[in-house]
Amino acid sequence: MKDGGNEAAGPGTTARTAGEKSRAPEGAAAASPAGEASPDDGPAAGGEAAGSGEPVTAEGTRTGKPGSAAPDTGTSPDSGRGTGTATATGKDTAPEPRADASEPESDTDANTSGGFPDATAGTSGTPARPVDQPTAVFKALRRPSAGPAAPDAPTTDSPTTALKVPPAPRPQTDPEPASGPAGRPSTFVPLRGDEPAPAEASRAGTAGPVAPAGLPETERTTQQPVPPLPPLDLLAELTNTPDTPVRTVMRRIKIWTPLVLLLGVVFTVVQILRPLPEPELTRSAAPAYTFQGSRLSLPFPGEGQGAVEVEGLGVMGSYGAQKPAPIASVAKTMTAYVILRDHPLKGKEEGEKITVDPQAAKESDNWENESVANLREGQEHTLKQMLQLMMIPSGNNAARLLARWDAGSEAAFVEKMNKAAADLGMKDTVYTDPSGFKKTTTSTPMDQLKLAKVMMKNDVFRGITDTTNTDVPGSGPIRNGNDRTLLQPGVDGIKTGSSTPAGGNLLWSFQTEVDGRLHRVNGITMNIQDGTNPYEKTQKAITHSINVISKAREGVTSAAVVRKGDVLGHLDNGMGGRSAVVATEDLKAVGWAGLRIELALNDGGTDLPRSGRAGDTVGQVSIGTGPARVSVPVALQEDLAEPGWGDKLTRLG
């Protein structure tokens, strides 16, 4: 009969008799809606019939093995088991099966439960209702029933129940009476009585069984998992709110606005608490100044070598080969340096007592071959007196005595001399004896000027070298061989030296006053060989030195390098604020014609401000180094504002 558009069992079913064996006739399985399985159908519903690999065509006929026609012999190769795959036909009625009179028929639906043969079916006389196996879609087997099931008692499909699939309404059908005394009626139950007829199923030869269309999507068998939804779509699905473009935009605004506000707060705090960059004072004026006039030319001699230097400004001039050469008694300057460094004297101090040893007393008699001081064995002289006897009359024996007294031996003292020379940067100087008598003691003009610069800072030493003559108790009067030079204005040293290999030499120094300040000029004349003996050569060296001293004194001058109000640079507070800086007064520098000097703009040893008013001092501009260094303050030309909140928040660096 018809129920909801599906054809019920009756005309398409065959009564079975007890004890008969039968096979499922062609068309015995009624067509159900395409791709749909009923809870009351067996495992063959909507899928593969249990226990057989023979397919059933869309018309309900058994095809045997795939690709071959099923012979109509009336016999089954496998008794009591389903022999094919049932597919929906898409028709309202199933074709009438043909019964084989030679063999008893058996109902596959009645003999199997979840694909297992039922031993009681067809023998006990108790009919068993067919059980729907939706789990066949998932290829799951059902455990056989413990006993015969009542005809009207529905068997619960556990896998289907676990998936929460609502059972289809069970139609009220009346099974036909059994065909024999031991048989039972076979009833066809439609899968879904309230659904429209399915479309026509695929014909034989189409690829694979079709998944039941009536099942929910969650029950469909798929090979790939469903990908997760995007966060916004998932949120919309959970809230059951229809997703519209306006709601999507508003939802995104609600989600991102707090994050943006939080990031803005963090950014603001970080920008405010970040250390501010250090202010910077940069120079914009010319980096150097060149004194006007023709370049100064000093009257250097035509022989030997020499140089002149103004402390803090640089070399005024030089001449000659500038190579190491013997320096004779000029070497005593280094001897005095080592003694006063290790045994310093201050003011009017005389220092320790030194006893004249036999060797120094014996060398006093060698006055015909070298310059010596009058020393007697056992005499005691103060350290200052011994320095006078070494520097003023140039006593070689006094220099050797001081070396032995200080280091224990002359060789040990010579090592100290060479180490001191290296420390002072005198890389072209070698000392082999404390007096310079040996010709192997050599140096260069520039190395000796380095030593002169250091020694003329010592008041005790400078007082000794500025002495023309004196009287040392026990040794008598002594006279300085450099007295002619010392009579020149401002000259206060330093040392003469003469020998046959070295010729005439003079290391000299003087001070000159410029704009109320004293500036020291050091020079040396070396290796003058014009003369018949060492004395004449020394006098020649003194004469040449006096000429150079006079010209150098005249050449040292001053000039206004910077005028008051000149813009010298800018002060940048590091946050975009900037103000020009100007000199607060004239800056005069010392030099000579043709000299190029560097200008330095710096903070003057104080921290640079980030803000200030016009006229506030923020640094200084300077020229020169050492005693020749001069400087004047620089100030802001205009107000410099303190960095504001906006500057702090918008800075990127």
Image (cartoon, rainbow, N blue to C red):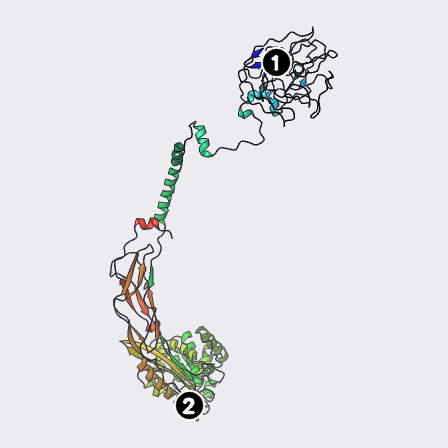
> Which of the two discs, 1 and 2, labels the residue nearer the N terminus?
1
x and y percentages locating residue 266 in the rendered image: 37, 44
Q: Quadrant of the N terminus?
A: top right
x and y percentages locating residue 56 in the rendered image: 66, 21
Name the residue at the right extreme.
102
As rendered, which of 647 and 364 lies closer to the eye? Answer: 647
Q: Is residue 353 above or below residue 255?
A: below
As rendered, which of 456 and 258 lies closer to the eye? Answer: 258
x and y percentages locating residue 499 in the rendered image: 45, 88
Q: Is residue 422 left or right of residue 552?
A: right
For label 2, the residue is: 537
Q: Is residue 446 left or right of residue 128?
A: left
Q: Is residue 350 left or right of residue 403?
A: left
Neighbourhood count class around disc 1 (C-alpha, 10 Å): few under 14, some 14–19, many 20 upward: many
Three-letter residue code for mark 2? Lys
Q: Nearer the viewer, mark 1 or mark 2?
A: 1
As rendered, which of 232 and 468 lies closer to the eye? Answer: 232
For label 1, the residue is: 188
Three-letter residue code for mark 1? Phe
Q: Can residue 166 be seen in the rendering of this structure?
A: yes
Name the residue at the top extreme.
181
Q: Can residue 468 be seen in the rendering of this structure?
A: no
For the residues labelled 1 and 2, the Cα–Cα distance comes to 147 Å
Q: Secondary structure at mark 2?
A: helix
Q: Secondary structure at mark 1?
A: loop
